[in-house]
Amino acid sequence: MQIRVLLCSCALLAGCATRATDPNAPRELLPDPTYSKWLQIRGLGRPDDDGGVKGVFRTADKVGAPVWTIAQWASKHSLADPAVTRQTPLGKDRFQIENLSKRVVVDCRCGQIDLGIFASACYDHPRQPNESWPHLLVQTALTDTRFPSHTCYVPDIKRLDVAMSCRLDSFADKQPGADPKLHAAQFQLFLYVQNLTQGDDGFGDMIWFGIPIFDNRYPVKEESYQRDGGKADASGKFIYSLPGKACIAEGQGFVRNGRLLAGKDARWVDVHIDVAPWIAYAYKLARKNGYLPTTDFKDLYVSGLNFGWEMPGAYDAVMQVRGFSLRATPKAPAP
């Protein structure tokens, strides 16, 4: 995973947190739940470019600076290249950006986003060990990492409720002879759980905290943890991924009776979980395995997130996402 997004400055963010008259009420952390402020587009990353912001996806009537970013690491046909990409309004509140290998559709009225990656257009040979793979992610900061919001401070969060509904609008397997150790189609959400204590030796160190949504290799994904690796530009940080059964109800996922539910058979899959206790567990697991050596639990904030596709294989797929929410309920102050 790319780590360059973690130490961004977002002083104008309003999402962390929603104003509430009750100081103990849940607060929405997402700065733009309807994707109405346009989305910046990053480059493809090395070796094509530096991965910096190269363009913008225009949605709705822009109000304020964009807070979402589209990341397209290690893919082909940059969404920021007008020579190969077309932006199209599909209606008053629906907008599309598309090229040969990627498609993003936003409905600003209801806060739905469709992420389509056609990875078969990105491979000219089956992926080999240590080779990078195409990504299509949307990401946002939740707080200014220089002056972090207390709303995002992990030790004082009682509940951190993640909710979204996802529908696999299409899926095509174009990876003959797939090796499950090398090839997969994965759609997941990652929170950045990060040390933001200024002056601390561990400032910036972090955990990739994962919520697995879809993986074509498994009907339900098991809990996993590992070092972020497998390619030259990996961050080397600790990755923890929840067990799928903790966030998707039994029998309500993307597989039924051994058959993948996509296209005309697709259904909306609800993802919902309070991740606060799991973050505490993941921190202990990271420390036990030698990560975050100079970071205490009191240093941790939820500083940002991304969700979308990682495609270490030739798969073409579109996932629709609606109702995404990240709500923090603070602990009651001590009497």
Image: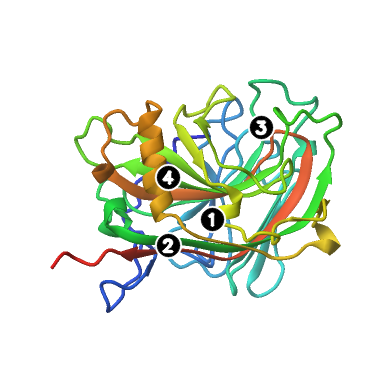
Q: CA distance from mark 1 to mark 4?
A: 20 Å
Label drawn at residue 192:
4
Q: Nearer the viewer, residue 167 or 212?
A: 212
* Image location (x, y in percent) of residue 174: 84, 38
Dot 3 falls on a residue whose secondary structure is loop
Q: Which residue is mark 1?
A: 39
The mark lying in front, picked from 1 and 4, is 4
Q: Which residue is mark 3?
A: 133
Which is nearer the N-term, disc 3 or disc 1?
A: 1
Callout 3, which amino acid? Answer: Trp
The mark lying in front, picked from 4 and 3, is 4
User: CB of mark 3 within 8 Å of CB of mark 2?
Assistant: no
* Image location (x, y in percent) of residue 266: 78, 62
Q: Is residue 145 visible?
A: no
Dot 2 falls on a residue whose secondary structure is loop
Which is nearer the N-term, disc 4 or disc 2?
A: 2
Q: Residues within 10 Å of mark 2 (few under 14, many from 20)?
A: many
Q: CA distance from mark 3 to mark 1?
A: 23 Å
User: CB of mark 1 within 8 Å of CB of mark 4?
Assistant: no
Please, is residue 129 above or below residue 112 in the view?
above
Which is nearer the N-term, disc 1 or disc 4?
A: 1
Label drawn at residue 307:
none
Label drawn at residue 31:
2
The reply, left or right, for residue 74 in relation to residue 90 is left
